[in-house]
Structure formats: structure tokens, C-alpha cells
Amino acid sequence: MAALLSEEDRKYLVDLFEKELKGEVKILFFGSKKKEECEYCELTEQILQELAETSNKITIENHDFDDEEALAKQYNVEMVPAILMLDANGKDMRIRFYGIPSGYEFSSLIEDVIATSKNGAVELSKDTIEKLQDVKSPLKLQVFVTPTCPYCPKAVLMAHKLAMQSSNIVGEMIEANEFPDLSMQYNVSSVPHIIINDGEGEFVGALPEEAFVEQVISVVKEA
Amino acid sequence: MPLFNLSNVSKPVELNYDVAIVGAGPGGLSAAIYAGRAGLKTIVFEKATEGGQILLTDMIEDYPGFTSISGNALADEFLSHAKAFGANFANEEIVEVDLESNPKKLKTDLGNEYTAKTVVIATGSNPKKLGVKGEDEFLNRGVSYCAVCDGSFFKGKRVVVVGGGDSAVEEGLYMTKIANEVTLVHRRDKLRAQKIAQDRAFKSNMKFIWNTVVTEIGGTKNVEYVILKNVQTGETTKHETDGVFIYVGLTPNVEIFKKYIKTDENGFILADDHMETNVKGVYAVGDIRKTPLRQIVTAASDGAIAVIDMTKYF
Ligand SMILES: Cc1cc2nc3c(=O)[nH]c(=O)nc-3n(C[C@H](O)[C@H](O)[C@H](O)COP(=O)(O)OP(=O)(O)OC[C@H]3O[C@@H](n4cnc5c(N)ncnc54)[C@H](O)[C@@H]3O)c2cc1C
């Protein structure tokens, strides 16, 4: 198959990773051979492969969602295609991409690789870090996106940063078009749409950090 | 658009600059190109994705040099052009400014405090709300302001587009490729959009309801109908629909500057012929400015004028 990354983008990534990657990053990919159930698995696998080729610090582990049930369960992978990242110590960064990270979301994937290489050290305000200490039980943030939505990466990255910062938070990107049933269940019709703890809370829009955290914390406080 | 887009990847942080440009739409990016070429140490802040509102449209046909180009591709050209001449980029939102201090201070949502000798306000505009009952309630249930973002949720469904300007007509046309039925509701009896867009709309299967305003958006779980009022007869009707796309004008992103900067009654910034505002060394370019035309070409032009003038401070 022809390369998905242009030569220019490939060079850009080689350069960027050369400068930015501190430690090793392991990307776990879960796919399915059943094409009718996972239209974008093949394409996702290929873009990850090309990504891995831009730096020797990045490795990809491909897994089959149907054949490796136990592993999928261990990582709480619920659907495919799924991507998650482990740092050099094998620590799960608690971020998930469900659906292909294409369009603007490709940038989110790159930012996550860089953060993972720094063991999940992310830039957040002092205020946020303090507030996150109130999150004492598991909290799931699902960010529904479309690849053509320019506001969406901001929300995805915010959810992913919170997940890297707080060991109780899982942050997911969900490509809404690829999971129509789930999108329908949560009435997604305008993105980014953020679902907190399977529907305990929700909001729409790429809010700035403080407001985003406020929304998340309000669910924690209610519980 | 390119299948894999890298424009959001941000750069390492450095805090002090000659020029701070707030917003990476065409106005901000044009200013960044000129500032880079003038040898000024430049940073551009963008809270969403570089490109600004041009990312919200499918095709652009009125920016010189490109007979037809996708908004995304044009944004990419602007961005790589600005980067080629050395502008720095930060994916941060400016949340607070001090424009009276010297140098000027800009605080971001990540808590970083940057300084710059001059500031270009290029924060553009956001879609204006209709301000009717149900608009907020159904915001995530069928009301949208961005067809390219949310259009795919309305495959095979019925949508109403509100407005009669370029954006309403162009985005309505975009929706005719996705939705089953597109009805444009306009408060006047003719469109304000450019002639060529009008011609295409009339040739398409788009339906039109003239002299009519939306007074309410309603439904149970999702949008199911809009209430329409004919402005001439006063008659109201219920029109069934699954989605409402609103293109009824712009509101300027000016809140954080209001304390320092003079605006007109609608919040658009007043600048002189050189784009300088009432505060020395602070410029306003593009959609944010009180200007007779809000387009890519005019935003780009503003950016150039501002930076050439600004060189007097260096
Ligand atoms: C649907 C649609 C279709 C259009 N079609 C055309 C067309 O075909 N041809 C044409 O010429 N024009 C078109 N326009 C108009 C054109 O897009 C605008 O005139 C132009 O983008 C204005 O540029 P700008 O740089 O002033 O602002 P914007 O493009 O609005 O960019 C401002 C940027 O600033 C960012 N920002 C705002 N506040 C902050 C902050 N506090 N901190 C950091 N960043 C911030 C925003 O996220 C945004 O990216 C269209 C507009 C729309 C909405």
C-alpha cells in the first residue's frame, strides 16, 4: 500500500521526535480481522506502523481484539480500532483512541506520544493539579469527535492530560462516525461532546482548561 | 483535507517576544508571515486549530491565487508559510492580558505568562446565536454552528439552515450533499450571499422559506421541529426537522481585551488606518475589527498593514 504520511510530514516527525522524545513509548493497537466490523482497522494499523518508523523510541504491538480477549480485558479495551500507550516502565497512560486518529486528531496522537515519552508529564495549571486531588474514584472521560472538527483536539488532549495526571482518570477519544450506536446512545450531534462516567455528566465544546476541569469536578462533587 | 493533519502539534515554550499574535486565523497568520520577515521574534497563540474560521468551510473560491481550495488546505498553506519565516506557535488560549504594562503581558490557560513589546489581536469571531427558545437546550441535540464538524450526523435526515449570507448559503449547499432535505429559512425575501453561491443554491435541491424567522427550536430528546414566524403576515407554523444549522452573523471574540480597547456598539474593535487600536503598540486585524468586509483576503491584508506599521517600535 502507498505510504499514508507524506514525505514532508514524515521528515517533520523524524525531526520533532528526535528533539522531543525522552524515553521509549510502546503503542498497543487492538484491531480485528473482521473487516465488516472494523472498517478502519487496517488503515489505523498502517498509520501506526509508519509512525513507528519515524523514531526508534516508538514500538508498536499489534493485538487481535477477538483472539486476545484476556489482554483486551486487562486493558479495558471495549471496541476497535483501539490505541493505547505505555511508557518506558510499561505504565498504562490511561488514554484510549477508539477509531482512527485521522484528520486533526492525528496531532493529538503525536502530542500523546511525546507526553508518554516523558512518563506522562503534562503541562497543567497549579489549580488543575490541586483540583484533581479530589478525584478519588475511577472517572471516565469520553470525548466524541469527528476528524474534520478543528476544535476537537483541544478537548481530546485535555481529557488525555487529565488522565496522565490523575491515576483515577481514563481519557478516551471516540471517532463518532465509526461508532454510530454509541454516539446515538449519548445523542452526539455536535462535537466535541464530552461524556463523563457513562453519562453522569456531559458537556459540549472545547472549553479552556479551567472550565473543562470545572465540569469534570462538578460530577465528582455530586457523587 | 489531508487524512493526517499535524497542525496542532505545539512547540517548546519560551516566554518573551517582540510580537505576540493572539489567534491563528488568516489575519494572525498573515501578520506572522510579515513579522517573521521583518526579523521580529514572534509568537502566535491559538486555542483551537491554526487556520481559524477557514477550517469551518468546505471550499474557498475567492482567495486570489486559488480558484478553488479546501479551507483546510488553505490553512495549511498559511501555516507553513508563517513557520517558514520563523514564527513560533503555542497551542494555548490567552485568558488575560495587561496591555498597559511595558512590555505587555499575556496569560494563558496553562498558567504561562508571556510578554511582548507589541500585540496583534486576531481573535476573529464566533457564530452569533439566534437567541431563541430551545437553542441552548438542544445545543448538543441537533443545533449546530459548524456543518463540516457535525454534518455527518445528519446523513439522510432533514435540516434547516438559518440565515441568508455567504456562510448560510455555502454551508447549506454543503449539507445538500449529506442530508436528505435542506431548507433555508431567511428573514428577508432575497439572499445576501454572493451571486455565484445564490445561483448554485437555486439550482440545487435546497428549499427556501422567505420572510421568515425561527422563533423556537423544540423536540423531546432531540430537535424535532422549529417554530417559524412569517415576518409579514405574523403567521406561525411548525416545521419538522432533525437539525438546525445557524449562520446569522458574527460576534467578536473581544471579551479579554475590552478593559483596554475601544470597540463599536457591537464589540468590534476600532482601529486606525494602520490597524493600531487606542493603545499604542496594540493592533487589531481581521474579523475582530470594525470593517466593511470580513473575508480571508481582508484579514490577510490587515495583518500585513499592522506589522509594517509596527516596525516603528523596533
Ligand atoms: C462557514 C464559513 C465560511 C466562510 N467562507 C469564506 C470564504 O469562502 N471566503 C472568505 O474569504 N471568507 C470566508 N469566511 C470568512 C473567513 O473565514 C473570516 O473572515 C476569516 O477567517 C477571519 O480571519 P481572522 O484571522 O480575523 O479570524 P478567525 O479566522 O476567526 O481566527 C481567529 C482565531 O483566533 C483564535 N482565538 C480566539 N480567541 C483566542 C484566545 N483568547 N487565545 C488564543 N486563540 C484565540 C480562534 O480559535 C481562531 O482560530 C467564512 C466563514 C465561515 C464561518
Image (cartoon, coloured by chain):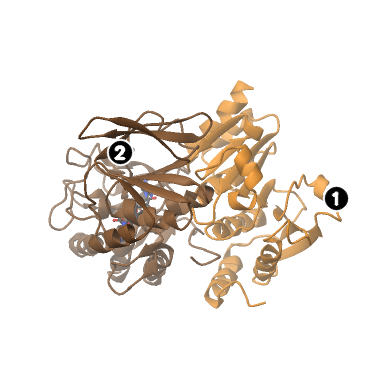
- Residue B84 in picture, x, y percent from top left: 40, 72
Marking on residue B233:
none
- Residue A131 in picture, x, y percent from top left: 57, 31
Q: Colour of chain B?
A: brown
**Which of the two residues, B159 or A130, is positioned nearer the viewer here?**
B159
Q: Amino acid at mark 1?
A: Glu
Report the residue that reaches farthest toward the left.
B273
Disc 2: which residue = B255
- Residue A172 in picture, x, y percent from top left: 64, 46
Q: Chain of mark 1?
A: A
Name the quarter showing ligand 1.
bottom left
Please determine if labels 2 and 1 lie on a single subunit: no
Above or below residue B37? Residue A62 is: above
Say which residue appears at 23% left-offset and 40% top-offset: B267
Above or below residue A55? Residue A155 is: above
Q: Is residue B28 visible?
A: no
Chain ID, orange in image: A
- Residue B314 in picture, x, y percent from top left: 22, 62
Above or below residue B247? Residue B202 is: below
Q: Which of the two marks, 2 or 1, is nearer to us in this view?
A: 1
Label 2 neighbour load within 10 Å: few <14, some 14-19, many 20+: few
Helix, strand or loop status at disc 2: helix
Marking on residue A69:
1
**Which of the two residues, B240 or B65, is positioned nearer the viewer here?**
B240
Q: Amino acid at mark 2?
A: Glu
Q: Is residue A221 visible?
A: yes
Q: Is residue B176 left or right of residue B36?
A: right
Q: Is residue B79 left or right of residue A117?
A: left
Helix, strand or loop status at disc 1: helix
| Cα–Cα gap, marks 2 and 1 | 52 Å
